[in-house]
Amino acid sequence: MLAPQASVEEGTLADRASTRLVQAIITGELIQGQKLNEAELTSLFGIGRGPLREALRQLEGMRLVRRIPHAGVRVVQLNKDMMADLYSVREALEGMACRMAAERMTDEEVNTLLLLLGQHAEQIEATDGQIYIQSEGDFDFHYQIALGSRNQMLIDLLAGELYQLLRMCRYRTSRLASRTRPALQQHRQIVEAIADRDGELAEMLMRRHISGAWKSISEMMDEDHDSKPKLVSRTKTASGS
Amino acid sequence: MLAPQASVEEGTLADRASTRLVQAIITGELIQGQKLNEAELTSLFGIGRGPLREALRQLEGMRLVRRIPHAGVRVVQLNKDMMADLYSVREALEGMACRMAAERMTDEEVNTLLLLLGQHAEQIEATDGQIYIQSEGDFDFHYQIALGSRNQMLIDLLAGELYQLLRMCRYRTSRLASRTRPALQQHRQIVEAIADRDGELAEMLMRRHISGAWKSISEMMDEDHDSKPKLVSRTKTASGS
DNA sequence: TATCTCCAGATTGTCGACAATCCATCCTTG
DNA sequence: CAAGGATGGATTGTCGACAATCTGGAGATA
């Protein structure tokens, strides 16, 4: 279960609880669909219910939990439909971000991207193509491009709520996705287009990169779904409710 | 000032406070940049600080307020950059929504859209082209198209956080935007493309519609900005009681 | 006079206790 | 025995009070 002690000691208790919960949900420490009991969490975190409830409200805004009045909050269920929605939205948003980044990024930022590609290539060689996808935060390729768009709202969306959901997807599908080398190659092409200040091409390549990733993940999920009886889900995979 | 009594009596106090605050911010009852004092709001709403703080966390997630730890929350300042960002994001998102809607909407939904256009035309004639933009909620054209996309994440974004920000923009610029008739004409073309199930064209028309709207608003803001000596100050934004 | 320090008031952050609501179980009743 | 309703426990929603932090100004010192 979750470690009873927080690692950082800065910020308000609500904010700290929020980041801890985000991490716990993304890594799977908190199972999808699991009911989050306030009393348990408060005693676990050693905080009162006030800050905890504020944190939960924040998580609700990030779509990481679903809250039903008088019935508690549950960790979100990442079904295939939701992931498809996420990748579609990312395709539109990151495509735009990529075009803007090509137009607005400084040369230094482009160099940073190139450096990133080098590091990723090394990681792939060192781990034989396993953990490329796991790179996070400042080191994430897509994150850097979002920053380059200079569109704060876009940055907030891609680096905030949608990014957390994406990390959640990656954690659940990392054992499936083994297409790190083609991904790296596509990243190279994208950076090349950005370096050439070719916004149109950069957008197109990014969109293709994301839709291709989804196609690959989608297929692998189907195979995985067939082989295993899968965890407890609602009656049908179709759009619920 | 805000009315001291809530109109609806359902849901938790936090949720009710949230919707009231959203409304107050959008309509300008709460001035942009204004500091939100918890004590004032609690006595005004007749609720405790717990629910109020939860509501404020929620508003923060919608980008309607900015919170600084130990320094309180302020209503967001809608400057031109932020509005430009919003319209860019909308262009990408609504463009995609429009394409998906053309592919996925039922014929009944398309008919609903046509009906909407008729109502809007009537309103324009009745008010001589004034209040078309103000239509909201279920009756909003863009909202209906978002619903037609069948992408829940897209719907949440466009009908949720981004929609509130858009309404806020509209309230601030309604006196400027008098291009209701060309907008209606563009809406007609979009519905036509959707009815023809031509997703590509529908997307393109929607993107052009939104970017055109922004260009118009942007120019009018510049003119308005020149005529007046600016009224937004960074400090001491008179927290009038 | 300008600047620094320190204090008091105000505001935000946090906690514990109480009230309202929901859920599962058991009991009654046909 | 099945169906419906009552009941107790658990959980969420809410409030008031206390602690931590910030802000603004008064006063001292160079």
Image (cartoon, coloured by chain):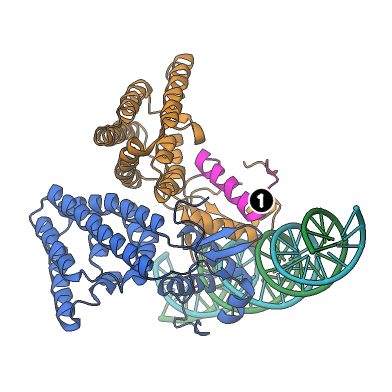
Chain colours: A blue, B orange, C cyan, D green
- Tell me which residue sits at (52%, 48%) in the image: B238
Q: Position of residue B160 (x, y in %)?
A: 47, 47
- Tell me which residue sits at (33%, 64%) in the image: A221
- Left or right, D7 with respect to A181, comes to right
Asked if residue B4 is positioned above or below residue A20 in the image, the reply reads above
Locate residue A185: give its quadrant. bottom left
Residue B30 visible here: no
Q: Position of residue A20 (x, y in %)?
A: 47, 75
Q: Position of residue A132 (x, y in %)?
A: 23, 74
- At label 1, the amino acid type is Gly
Q: Secondary structure at mark 1?
A: loop
Q: Position of residue A226 (x, y in %)?
A: 36, 66
- Tell me which residue sits at (24%, 36%) in the image: B200
- The chain to which mark 1 is attached is B
Task: Return the residue nearer the eye: B70 or A80.
Answer: A80
Asked if residue B177 is positioned above or below residue A116 in the image, the reply reads above
- Left or right, A43 with respect to A81, comes to right
Residue B231 part of the magenta-drawn span = no
Locate residue A25: give its quadrant. bottom left
Residue A48 visible here: yes
Residue placed under numbered mark 1 in the picture: B11
**Dominant secondary structure of the residues highlighted in magenta in the image:** helix
Residue B16 part of the magenta-drawn span = yes
Query: What segment is highlighted magenta in the picture?
Result: B8-31
